[in-house]
Amino acid sequence: MTYFSEDGKPVGRELTILEYLDKFPNYNHNALMKEVVIKKLMAKKTFEKTIKSLISKGIVRASKSKNKIIYIRTDNFEEKYNSLLEKQTEIMYKFLIHEIKKITDNYKTYSVEDKVFNITFHLRNILQTDTGFTILDSLKNPDETLYADEHLTNQQLISSLLSIVAKDIDFKTVYPLVMNSLGIFPPLDYNEINKNQNS
């Protein structure tokens, strides 16, 4: 089964390669590729793209042994990832505070396309940053909200962006495009869904 990540790329291929790395830990690049390609699990180029993706995500690292490349799962991935998540989330959080101030000052000068792009881009980043803080809260202490101030600031940043849009002349065009591009829809009527399923 193939699963898809946020950017639409199949995760099932990554799972396949990780499984083969576990099965054949001492295989070099060519031997591992032949194993996967011969069994027709994926094409050669797909295998190479998938390995590069795993390396770029820090899940796998490449190690040279003589003139051969061997792939190894990254040691302490969880610890390294959590540390990186905290660092990147805090950097993005500070960046967004600064960026929202710039948008507040310049929004009326943007074209409609730029308004949609900037508001959507920054709302997505705020939501991603808030998700980062939620994950960090869950990892550090699931019974407490350690990043309450950051969550509140993110909420205020969202409110600020939506307020800028609401007060603008292009509101009727920008607002629906932004909300639809975020993929945030009003809650469904679950009674109606149940009726349709039971019919």
Image (cartoon, rainbow, N blue to C red):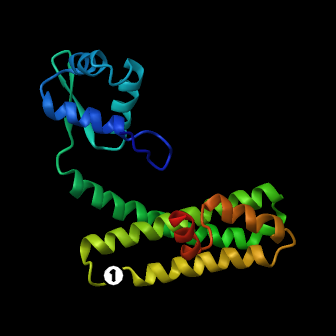
Count of number-bearing discs:
1
Locate residue 33 relative to residue 131 in the image: left or right: left
The residue at which mark 1 appears reads as 146
Position of residue 18 measured from the top left corner of the image (x, y, whole percent): 24, 36
The amino acid on which the numbered mark 1 sits, given as a three-letter code, is Leu
Depth check, front residue: 192 or 37: 192
User: Against 70, is 197 above or below?
Assistant: below
Residue 140 showing in the rendered view: yes
Where's residue 19, x and y in %?
A: 21, 35
Q: Which residue is found at the position 70% from the left and 68% from the top? A: 103
Tell me what residue is drawn at x 22 percent, y 58 percent: 79
Q: Quadrant of residue 52?
A: top left
| Crowding near the residue tagged with mark 1, few <14, some 14–19, many ≥20 C-alpha atoms within 10 Å | some
Is residue 55 visible to us here? no
Q: Which residue is drawn at 20% across and 30% down?
A: 20
Snapshot quadrant of residue 54 = top left
Q: In this view, does 27 lie to the left or right of 132?
A: left
